[in-house]
Image (cartoon, rainbow, N blue to C red):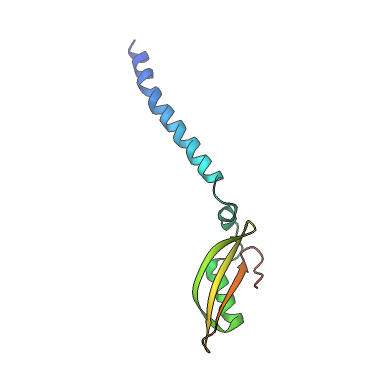
Amino acid sequence: MRSRLLTLALIPLLLTAGISTVDAQGLVERRPRYEREADKARISLDQAVNMAESRYRAKAVKAQSVSNGGRLVYQIRLLSSDGRVRTVHVDAQTGAMN
């Protein structure tokens, strides 16, 4: 009788733990593709900023990760010494810049 009561008391706890695990797994799979690709990115946001600053001889004033066709891309806004603003996109996988 005592073991049966213990089992009945543990069922809600086990069910709650099971639901949490399922929900957490579902959240991982629901992340946008570009967020999942961030885990596999070959180039970090800091590296992309350094590449863009070197190539265009300008200072980065804003940098963020964005999705472009489901791929992770870094969008970097640069300010040159003559006051021009340029936005550059760097592919996180290949390092290609445009």
Res 70 → quadrant: bottom right
Q: Quadrant of residue 42?
A: bottom right
Q: Image point 53% across, 40% down: which residue?
A: 26
For the point 54% across and 67% down, the residue is 45
**In the rendered view of the protein, which quadrant contains the C terminus?**
bottom right
Q: Residue at x 42, y 27 (%)?
A: 14
Above or below residue 73? Residue 54 is: below
Query: Is 86 above or below relative to 66?
Result: below
Residue 36 drawn at (x, y percent): 57, 52
Residue 97 position within the rendered picture, expressed as x and y whole percent measured from the top left: 65, 72
- Left or right side of 71 for 76: left
Relative placement, left or right, of 41 versus 18 is right
Please state the horizontal and vertical placement of residue 79, each as a whole percent of the image: 52, 81
Q: Nearer the viewer, residue 69 or 47?
A: 69
Quadrant for the N terminus, please. Answer: top left
Image point 44% across, 36% down: which residue? 20
The image quarter containing residue 57 is: bottom right
